[in-house]
Amino acid sequence: MTSNGVSSYSSRTTRSLTPGIFAPIPLFFVQGVRTSVYLRSIELHVVRLAGAGVRPLLAGTMGEGIHLTHGERTTLVRSARNALDGAGFSHIPIIVGTGSGSTRETIVLCEEVAAAGADAVIVIPPGYFAGVLSSHRRALKAFYVEVAERCPVPVLIYNYPGASAGIDLDSDLVVDLATSCPNLSGIKLTCGSVGKLTRIAAAVADPAFDKLYPRKNPNAPFLVLGGYADFLTSSAFAHGHGAITGLANIAPHALVKLFELSEAAATRDPSRLPEAQQLQGIIARADFTIAKASISGTKFLTERLFGYGGLPRKPLPPIDPEDAERLWKHPHVQELLKTELEFSDEQPL
């Protein structure tokens, strides 16, 4: 028996969660229709990204998870899994957003998507009652403890104050959760705090962590992931594990290249640092510009680049046509797209 009950673990084996780049997949609709999910576009997109080395996250913020019915969510998972398997990417894991307004529904969603083929879930704090929860650490911890204990697959924490009514988990609470819950297997930090990432990653990187607090699933170590692409290089030097970033929908090869360069510079070849820094600048500028256009801007860009995108589900507004053209022509965007073309046929480091 281990110190945190790992020997009692009986959940199914999942595909390995490893450091790298993950993309929150947008929710594509039938052209001109904001109610009918276009599964074929989602299937094409996850396979396209997998070919570049990017793993999918379904039903997250970019994927308008809050707008999905239970049935739509599980259908997305099954479709993506079938598409990846059919294209020779059966080893690629799928993460699915299951955060909800209550502990009960969150657990139900976890069970449903696990049965549909999800390899892990990512859970945002329930923000409707943020006035109570944001200052109630015991309640926030209890939420994640119960979800992690009852979820049949590994659970990642999703720290995004902008989508959870300001709830912002601090590094002390996250480390406490990591050491208390063996089925927690990472965190996405869309708070943008490099300091928080550094503190959490330092705790996880400590050689004693894995010995004292092993994960229930050995294929799912605790990953510390940024929510943006603008500090990937810094993250690598702070023992971070990559990012879950919407920008990977637009430039997957460039993001994977930056991750590889940053890891190489931090762990085995310091001479790669200048190359990583140069690419990080291009990606950071594009990330800043495209993120301001939000979900509708990213979907406009995928439409322009790949032929699928569509409108967001109501009440989210579509991007204004003039704003869309300005986004497309923006020098930061064009610089990124040129860079993506340069890396699209390169072999990994």
Image (tube, grey):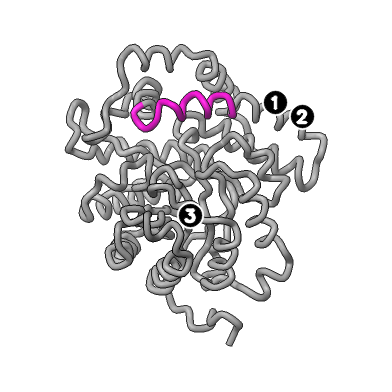
Magenta residues span: 284-296
Name the element at disc 1: helix
Question: In the image, what residue occupies the spot 56% across and 66% down?
Answer: 178
**180 is within the stretch colored magenta:** no
Q: Quadrant of the N terminus?
A: bottom right
Q: Amino acid at mark 3?
A: His
On screen, residue 187 above or below 55: below
Near mark 3 (Cα within 10 A), the count class, few <14, some 14-19 or many ≥20, is few
Please indicate whether residue 32 sits to the left or right of residue 212 in the image: left
Q: Amino acid at mark 1?
A: Gln
Does 214 sit above or below residue 85?
Answer: below
Q: CA distance from mark 1 to mark 2?
A: 6 Å
Q: Which residue is mark 1?
A: 278
Q: Which mark is residue 274?
A: 2
Residue 115 appears in the rendering = no
**Element under disc 3:** loop
